Image (spheres, rainbow, N blue to C red):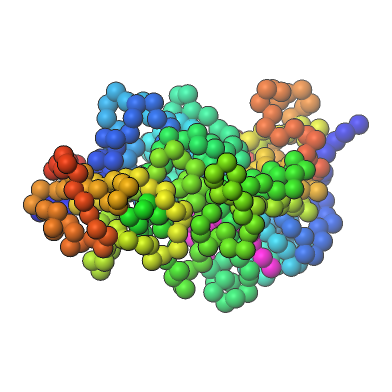
Amino acid sequence: MMPLDRRQIAWRAAQDVADGAYVNLGIGIPTLVADYVPAGREVVFHSENGILGLGPAPAPGEADPDLINAGKALVTLLPGGSFFTHSDAFLMIRGGHLDLALLGAFEVSETGDLANWTTDDPNMSPGVGGAMDLATGAKAVRVLMQHNTAKGEPRLRRLCRYPLTAPRAVSRIYTDLAVLDVAQAGFLVREIIAGLDLAGLQERTEAKLDAAADLRVLAVPEL
Amino acid sequence: MIDKQVASLAEAVAGIRDGATLLCGGFGAVGSPDELFEAVLDQGARELVAVSNNAGSGRRGLAALIAARRVRRVICSYPRTTDPVVFEEEYRAGRIELELVPQGTLSERMRCAAAGLGGFWSPVSVGTRLAEGKECRTIEGRDYVLELPLKGDVALIRADRGDRWGNLTYRKSARNFNPVMAMAADLTVVQLREIVQLGTLDPENVATPGIFVDRMVVIGGQP
């Protein structure tokens, strides 16, 4: 079996972003989604620091130091883009005006609880940023992450061990092994990579998994 | 005649008292009033409370104030930003207090203070550690926590252009927290790139109307 790399996870999530959607991309793998929105779909990317219509990174020599995204990386503005204040950026988030937030996570529970803001590492100050606002306010919250930690521990759990960002927030998860929905009865597996079956995925997951009636192979291109 | 321009940085920050709450504009280094922070360093106020999205980057600006142990408490959403060396050191040593506030709650609490409101019911942080100790209420089936207004004694603002009435414009994502902070303090102090004749700014594009501004000092710099 060949687990997806970060770009392939982003590619898979991008296939589900609808034409016309207003979308916020979290830091990490979600940021890569902008590169893989299928041709023909027009998507408006939102940034917490007061931008709609985020474009790609600037060409060499064309960076504007006053134009950054929420991850503090230099970006560009597309024609039709706009600037506004933080209050309005978060009004959009909290008030349910954003169609979709694609976020990273440490853990997701089988009821869709999201833990993505702190691991209580005593060597670092905690930071929450806009994570709670996005998890609470966006119309849909989907997570992109590795299925397991570097030590092999499952991140899809009955209950999150890390402090919650928001309860019952996540509706879909894209991992390097599978695509899963948070359904009424828990995690529902939609797609699994070739060479891995449901039993194999279950071994790598703490929460109980159910297979969708139309369970498919998670197929992505080489990127 | 109204003329809010002052001649020097020292005049701009004169009178800031020990223990004052400073609303500090900017998101990371963008839109951050670094020259005003350095003026506060020279001015001498101590035991300050800094309200800022981040807790300073490198050794300039807010980081310089923190390094000089002039800040008792930071109220922010995400203390770590690019190169947060100074804050992390002070925090680990237990020399600085941290109040963590979700980013949208931070801006809305200031907007509330600016608008003369006594607080607001927010769905953000419900069911998480950051809601502990807060008053809760269910409104039309949804749970909320009570968030209280956050007022500044002084706001330190970075703007692009201004006129002598105090009307301000910003550049791109350097707007961020600046307009909401400019509204929410007893004394609003602005560092400007450029002062222009009254009537030059397009009234349709004024982002901070002069009613909120008390003092402005011209710093110069590239547009």
Q: Horizontal and vertical percent for residue B196?
A: 74, 30
Q: Is residue A201 left or right of residue A120?
A: left
Q: Horizontal and vertical percent for residue A106?
A: 36, 59
Q: Based on the displayed image, in which of its 4 quarters is residue B41 positioned? A: bottom right
Q: Nearer the viewer, residue B131 or B162?
A: B131
Q: Based on the displayed image, in which of its 4 quarters is residue A116 positioned? A: bottom left
Quadrant, the C terminus of chain B: top right
Q: Nearer the viewer, residue B99 or A211?
A: A211
Task: Please identify the residue farthest to the left as the structure is shown.
Answer: A195
Task: Please identify the residue farthest to the bottom as the structure is shown.
Answer: B93
Using the rendered image of the protein, determine whether residue A179 is visible from the camera's viewpoint.
Answer: yes
Using the rendered image of the protein, determine whether residue B181 is visible from the camera's viewpoint.
Answer: no
Q: Note whether A120 is above or below B12 in the view shown.
A: below
Q: How many numbered dots are placed on residues in this image?
A: 0
User: At x 83% / y 55%, what residue is drawn?
Assistant: B14
Q: Nearer the viewer, residue A143 or B80?
A: A143
User: At x 77% / y 64%, what residue is drawn?
Assistant: B19
Q: Which residues are magenta?
A: B72-85
User: At x 10% / y 48%, what residue is drawn?
Assistant: A194
Q: Is residue A165 left or right of residue B132?
A: left
Verify whether residue A213 appears in magenta. Answer: no
